[in-house]
Image (tube, helix red, strand yellow):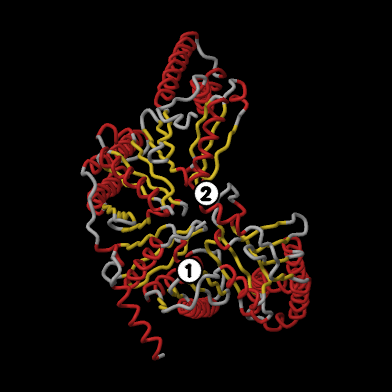
Amino acid sequence: MDSIAKDFSNEQLDLASLPKYESVAFSSVSSTYLIKMNIQTGILMLVLFVLLGVLWFFQLNQWQSGIILGVISAAFIFRFWNNYKLLQSLGYAVRDKDVVYKRGFIFNKTTIIPFNRVQHASISRGVWDKVLGISSLNIFTAGGSGSDITIPGLDPEMALLLKEAIAVKISKDEF
Amino acid sequence: MNSKAYNTAQRQSIAGILLIFISSLYKLVKIFWAMGAYLLLSGPSKTTLIYTAIGLVVLTGLTLVYSYLYYRKFIFYIDYEREEFVLEKGIFSTENSAIPFDKIQQVYFKRSILQRVINVYSLVIDTAGSNQKEVEIKAISEKDANKLLEILLKAKSEKVEENQIEEEKLEPGNKEVWTHKVDILTLLKIGISTNYLRGLSLVLAFVMGIYNRINTYFKDQIDDVEVYFSQFSGILQSIGYLILLFLVLLLLSISITIIEVFIKYYGLKIQQTKDKLEVEMGLKTNTKVSLQPRRLQLMRINTNPVQKRFNLYEAQISLSSSENELQKNKIKIPGLGKEIVKKIKSFLYSESSGSQFRTTFSPDKLLLFRKISLAMLPALIFVVLWYFTALVSLQLWAVLVLAGVYIVAAIAIQIFSFMARKLIFTEDFLQKKKGLWNKTEETLELFKIQSISVKQPIWYRRRNLVNIVFHTAGGDLKFYAVSNDILRYINYVMYKAEVSKRNWM
């Protein structure tokens, strides 16, 4: 046991000197993304309310619709609050050798992709992205969908810049 | 030569508009045909028909406009400076993809009937990874398709040349190093020892059957001991039948498994040459796979105490899924002795020497707590069912005994399997061990990771716990509820991947 403990302390020093992904300075995404999320949530809410209204008109009595209205409202208040928290939790950082992306307030998830494992990067813009003037950057690896990341709510120029920076890194890091 | 061809924005063949138009129309028809059929069958009035016709014309016109815009917005070109192929598409939502030459796995043509009629080709550019990431240009003329294919393949091979040469040099060394054949007796052993679970469930069904039978007798005649004794022989008889039935079923189950094993693995042969491991097996369809250490992503060794006694281990090997063979990227090789497993390992992980360190992580007790709570759920459901419904008709003591036995057993199983769960870091490898009965050992070479995800649900935050997922091209390796001391090792794994100049596939 003694020798193992010795090795262990040796290696701890070594490991501690490695750069820490958890202490990088994250850049946050544009707050316009919050508007996009809220618009999408709002549309969903509107649809549900209309549906409920129709149901209320034809099927339900005051009480039932009241309860459902309460539940839906509570759910959406939570959603809006979560959107806000989500935006705050979104962050990305480009280091020399990898890109780090974190998201999620309740379920926080941080993904680190080394540049020498990136297959390709692309920029996508949905309808709302176009209206609001933001872009998403997608980074693909060969590790399946859990391994890929999509950074939303970027300024289009920033997204392009990042994509090109990544493209350069990918080709530079190859043998 | 036109070495810089396609360096400006290109559109598809003009016939592409037609292709887009027809396929969008087809999509619309697929969505709305039911509505149309309904309209026709309902005996519409003249005005409705006219309105419908106008609507259809407008819709067709809009589709045509859409097709044209889509065609205009679909742009591709080759960026020679950055050495990548760029594709932009989409009217409402745009997508801009760039594929570096050296990431291209394959370039090929496809042609549907429609494409044949309007004389265009589909050019597909495959990158490693899942199918959705491929890029497809749906309407391209034969001339362009050929040229583009040639350029891309050339660019790709130029980029990957260095590695390729290295590989080809190794190729001639086809000398056999060792061969391992799995004989019929071993296959028999595998057949008997693998699917005992099916046997176990049969035993369970059997016990339940007996119980029910006894119960029905008991229920009516619980007080009447006399009658009970007179019926006793009857019960015995029916139990005898049940045992017979059970034995027959068990035999059937085992023989089915054995037949399965024989069909799948008959003639299993592993042969190591200098740079490859050739695996051959199968009675009906002969599978032949060659394993190169380079392609290996994740290896899993399974065994259980019974199989361990027989010296039987099963290796599951995940390979990187390039070259479109998506199904063939996981190979199961059963019936390996301990020495063979060792040989395979030492071949596949040849370059690893001894490790400087070895650190073991165990999950936090929170995971145990969660697993036990989950395991209690069936007991709870059972009790609730018994209490509130007539679905389960049992005496109180029987319920208590059953529930008690289940709870004790479940907790014991959970505790032991919790203790068996381990994640081990060494200098070059990551190993995950788990399983109480079915012991599984997953090994991953550190530099083969694609990326790492660190997850932290909000309720982990106070306890400083994280869930870790290591993504590889052959599947994920997950480890849950581990103390965030592990982050140091995550940084180490990243470091290993980032400094590695070795090819991961």
x, y percent for residue B430:
46, 70
For the N terminus of chain A, the image quarter is: bottom left
Circle 1 sits in a helix, a strand or a loop, which is it? helix
When asked about the image quadrant of residue B358, the answer is: bottom left
Tell me the CA gap for discs 1 and 2: 72 Å
- Chain ID for label 1? B
The 10 Å Cα crowd at callout 1, few under 14, some 14 to 19, many 20 or more, is: some
Q: Which mark is residue B161?
A: 2
x, y percent for residue B292:
59, 61
For image coordinates 42% across by 22% down, the residue present is B66
Identified by mark 2, the residue type is Glu
In the displayed structure, does residue B201 sit left or right of residue B94? right
Which of the two marks, 1 or 2, is nearer to us in this view? 2
For image coordinates 50% across by 65% down, the residue present is B385
The 10 Å Cα crowd at callout 2, few under 14, some 14 to 19, many 20 or more, is: few
Q: Is residue B449 above or below residue B313?
A: above
Same subunit: marks 1 and 2: yes
Circle 2 sits in a helix, a strand or a loop, which is it? helix
In the displayed structure, does residue A166 sit left or right of residue B329? left
Of the image marks 1 and 2, the number of the one nearer the N terminus: 2
In the picture of the structure, the residue carrying the numbered disc 1 is B387
- Of B229 and B412, nearer the camera is B412
